[in-house]
Amino acid sequence: MAVSKRIVLRFPPRLSGQPIVSRLVKDFNLDFNILKALITPEEEGLLVLELSGEQNDYDKGVRYLAKTGVRIQSLSQDVIRNEERCTHCGACITICPTGAFEIDLSTRQVTFHDTKCVACGLCIKACPPRAMEVHF
Ligand code: SF4
Ligand code: SF4
């Protein structure tokens, strides 16, 4: 069965510069699409990927990633917006790697599209009134 999943990978500094993601293609027959990459030398890197392939290959690829020391975002996490707290300030819009927030320029209201969210958690700290919450 073919699957396509969006995952968040966090790389410790010692792994930066290594061809880890390209091995997903070569050794595990997976396709990937990079949705966002934030990698700076000497710091933790963050990569949001859409990973596609056969379920078996996907499982093996993810196990390989985990073995190398890459932290894979738990997909059971759910990020929600507390509507009562949101002030529609817009601080989350540029932070979100998958474009889950959208502003209506005429009303200045910010909409949260939860189906685009990959639970990376970047908006949690960025939201001034702490309207974004992670649930496990
Ligand atoms: S940063 Fe927080 S308060 Fe501001 S628009 Fe986004 S969710 Fe709402
Ligand atoms: S956790 Fe926040 S920043 Fe990350 S994908 Fe979801 S909405 Fe965007």
Image (cartoon, rainbow, N blue to C red):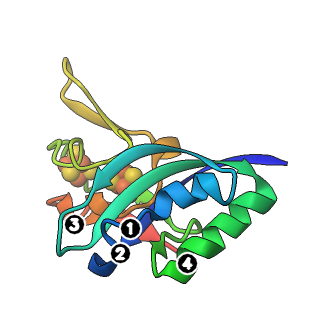
Task: Rate crowding at label 2 as few (under 14), some (14 to 19) or many (20 or more) other CA atoms within 10 Å.
Answer: some
Q: Which secondary structure, mark 3? A: helix
From the Cβ of disc 3, is ligand 2 less than 8 Å away? no
Sequence-earlier tag: 3 or 1: 1
Spatial separation of the CA atoms under disc 4 and disc 2: 12 Å
- Write down the residue under mark 1: 18
Q: Foreground mark, 4 or 2?
A: 2
The dot on residue 66 is 4
Front residue of 11 and 74 = 11
Taking the image as shown, residue 31 lies to the left or right of residue 86, namely right
Q: Position of residue 62 (x, y in %)?
A: 62, 68
Q: Position of residue 21 (x, y in %)?
A: 48, 58
Q: Which secondary structure, mark 1? A: loop
Spatial separation of the CA atoms under disc 4 and disc 1: 15 Å
Taking the image as shown, residue 136 lies to the left or right of residue 132, namely right
- Write down the residue under mark 3: 125
Disc 2 + disc 1, Cβ < 8 Å:
yes
Q: Foreground mark, 4 or 1?
A: 1
Task: Rate crowding at label 4 as few (under 14), some (14 to 19) or many (20 or more) other CA atoms within 10 Å.
Answer: few
Above-or-below relation of 69 to 112: below
Disc 3 + disc 4, Cβ < 8 Å:
no
Front residue of 13 and 98 = 13
Spatial separation of the CA atoms under disc 3 and disc 4: 26 Å
